[in-house]
Amino acid sequence: MSAAPHLLLAVSGHGFGHLSQCAPVVNALWERCPEMRLTVCGSLPHAVVAARLDRDFSYRQTELDPVLRMFSAWEVDVPASMQVYNEFYRNREAGLQQDLAMLRDIRPDLVLADIPYRVLLAAKLAGVPAIGLCSLNWAAVYATYAADTRENAAITGHMLSGYRAAESFLAPAPALPMPGLGNYRAIGPIARTGTQCQLELQQRTGLPAGTRYVLVAMGGIDTRLPLVNWPRMAGVAWVFAGPVSSLRDDMVTFDTLSMPFIDVLASAATVLTKPGYGTYAEAVCNGVPVLTLERPDWPETRYLNDWARTHGRLVEISRAQLEAGDFVAALEQLWQQQEKPPPEPAGIMQAAAVIQAHL
């Protein structure tokens, strides 16, 4: 092993949630092991990855796993997604050889995957230790939407074989149960914690003192929001994490604030989002209430909502309510709920300790 251990981070490009899970762990690893070198492989823009990581890294932009096709942040394009997964499976041998060539080129001491599975198979064949990290896995997602056929069972089995090839599969709370993984290891939640900066937020928006900010964050997937019906509330302003078509005087976009995203989140009166690990974990661990959109088909929804209700504050609205702008009463209900002490994101150091032991 080289004097400076070399970690390869393989990260999925489905939204920002996978990066939001593994980036705090990598940053914690650098604190424990300052000489560690990092190569990141994934399909996210370099600037998005760099914004989450504390130090310099090498980057190889490539797609390592099948990415769901989406109609919106909360609605899966099932036929298109099944085609993507099927094509990925049909090309599995050629893809495996590509991953093996990548490992020979990069020569990491350890692979950390959130949650590409084929690279875990490649690491096993190459004799490189590997660890999976995620609150879900693609086999569970695929099985949710795929028909019960022999071919689909083979695809699911292939995914599981990749995840089983890892030394451990670290599952931060709240995670899906994964009975098919004998290497499953539950850990605490993973989330950044921010600084409450309401005064700075007020100064940067130019809005009156006492304004309550609602952060609208849909997890990095482009989505048309029904702004024509968006409600006006006295003393409330809306901060949109992504670009929007038009703005009113009570609306701002995050990119105009020149503030860290996690500080904007920590300063918000509420986060309006859809079920997804990254935003839920960061909101609850920062004591910020969650107004969430219904997402009954997504396999994580029940576990995310139960955890958020137990450890924080959560109210769910329907898609019809979002489209009509009919969620003022839901926000008021959310703000009347009793505050709870936020949970510690203990999974960061737990995961870092496991990974460091393998490095």
Image (cartoon, rainbow, N blue to C red):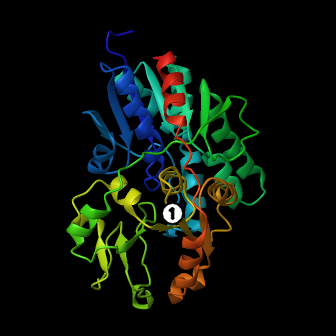
Q: Up-down: is 170 above or below 177? A: above
Residue 202 occupies quadrant: bottom left
Image quarter hosting the N terminus: top left
Viewer-closest of 39 and 349: 349
Viewer-closest of 170 and 187: 187
The picture places residue 165, in percent across and down from the top left corner, at: 62, 27
Please say whether residue 76 is visible from this viewpoint. no
Q: Up-down: is 215 above or below 141? A: below
Viewer-closest of 151 and 160: 160
- Residue at 55%, 21% (x, y): give it: 125
- Residue at 49%, 38% (x, y): give it: 95
Q: Count every numbered label the image shows and give the total.
A: 1
Residue 227 occupies quadrant: bottom left
The picture places residue 245, in percent across and down from the top left corner, at: 31, 81
Image quarter hosting the C terminus: top left
The picture places residue 17, in percent across and down from the top left corner, at: 47, 52
**Label 1 element class:** loop
- Residue at 26%, 49% (x, y): give it: 47
Q: Up-down: is 166 above or below 341? A: above
Viewer-closest of 145 and 55: 55
The picture places residue 345, in percent across and down from the top left corner, at: 52, 40
48 displayed left or right of 275 = left
Q: Dot 1: few (<14), some (14–19), or many (≥20) neighbours within 10 Å?
A: some
Name the kind of residue labelled 1 in the image: Arg
51 displayed left or right of 75 = left
Please say whether residue 284 is visible from this viewpoint. yes
Q: Which residue is mark 1?
A: 69
